[in-house]
Image (cartoon, rainbow, N blue to C red):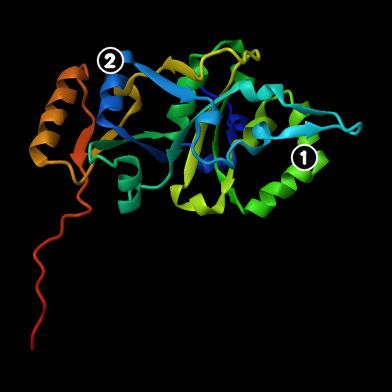
Amino acid sequence: MPAPTCNFLNLEESEINRKIHRFMSIDRLLGLFVTQQNVLVRPKLWDDPMENFLFKARGRNCQGVIGSFEFRHDFYGQCWTKGEETDAMWRIYSPDKNGVRITTTIRKLLDSLYDMTAEAASVSCFLGAVEYRTKEEIYQLLKDSRFVNACVADTTGREKCRTLLIKRREFTHEDEIRLIYKAPTTDPAAQDIYRHPFCPRNMISHILFDPRMDWNVYKAFKQHIYRAGDSYNYRITQSGIYRVPPLYASMS
């Protein structure tokens, strides 16, 4: 069952079929073939301390009573990007020169989660584009009681998810897309990861290897993936961003 357009957040309908990418180690890619499962994590595991700012905050009511938001335990997410590739992305996400970039589409990614989830999928499964704000703008949102109350009272899951789609402007180079799952019940003791079925053969259209990987190592991994991929017929290539043709300077 395809996800309804209202579960795509901060995206135009015309963007839903565009390509998106995820950088990962070769070990994680091979694990994806073995387990046939995609893995989302709780936002508390994300690197930037200003992420999931509302979930980390403590609320103060009109009587001055302070407490935490229990729904912070309900959500899991995974980060992708609309960006193609840059030198910075390879160096950040493939520091050991053993990374790959996989490609799918926005529609396919959300549908893979939506279709495999229980009947509450319409209020549990979302995919949205990250909005980049200044630190001061984020602080102002926390001070806006209308914003906070709307998030707390929201029963659709969308408004709470939108808070997970806000990040500091220092990270705009990531051009991020996030897949988000809201668990049906709050369980602080639950695992920090959520797995759902994910068939690489149907989901991934292109695997791009780190441009710095040794050519023979790349070729060996490529053959291994084709053998392990059950008639895998998508593109497997190595990035050529560091390859340049012979350079000639014109002289009169």
Q: Which of marks 1 and 2 is nearer the N terminus?
A: 2
Q: In this view, does 77 lie above or below 89?
A: above
Please say whether residue 237 is visible from this viewpoint: yes
Q: Residues within 10 Å of mark 2 (few under 14, many from 20)?
A: few
Please, what secondary structure does the residue beneath circle 1 have? Answer: helix
Q: Which residue is drawn at 10% across and 81% down?
A: 250
Q: Residue 247, located in which quarter of the rendered image?
A: bottom left
Q: Residue 147 carries which label?
A: 1
Report the residue that reaches farthest toward the bottom: 252
Kind of residue at badge 1? Phe
Q: Residue at x 12, y 61 (%)?
A: 245
Q: Residue 47 carries which label?
A: none
Q: Is residue 190 above or below residue 80?
A: above
Q: Position of residue 178 (x, y in %)?
A: 51, 35
Q: Position of residue 233 (x, y in %)?
A: 21, 26
Q: Residue at x 15, y 59 (%)?
A: 244
Quick check: 208 left or right of 61? left
Give the mark count: 2
Please say whether residue 1 is visible from this viewpoint: no
Q: Residue at x 59, y 17 (%)?
A: 121
Kind of residue at badge 2? Val
Q: Using the image as rendered, state which of residue 199 and residue 220 is in the foreground.
A: 220
Q: Position of residue 85 (x, y in %)?
A: 33, 48
Mark 2 lies on residue: 34
Q: Is residue 41 above or below residue 47?
A: above
Q: Residues within 10 Å of mark 1 (few under 14, many from 20)?
A: few
Please, what secondary structure does the residue beneath circle 2 have? Answer: helix
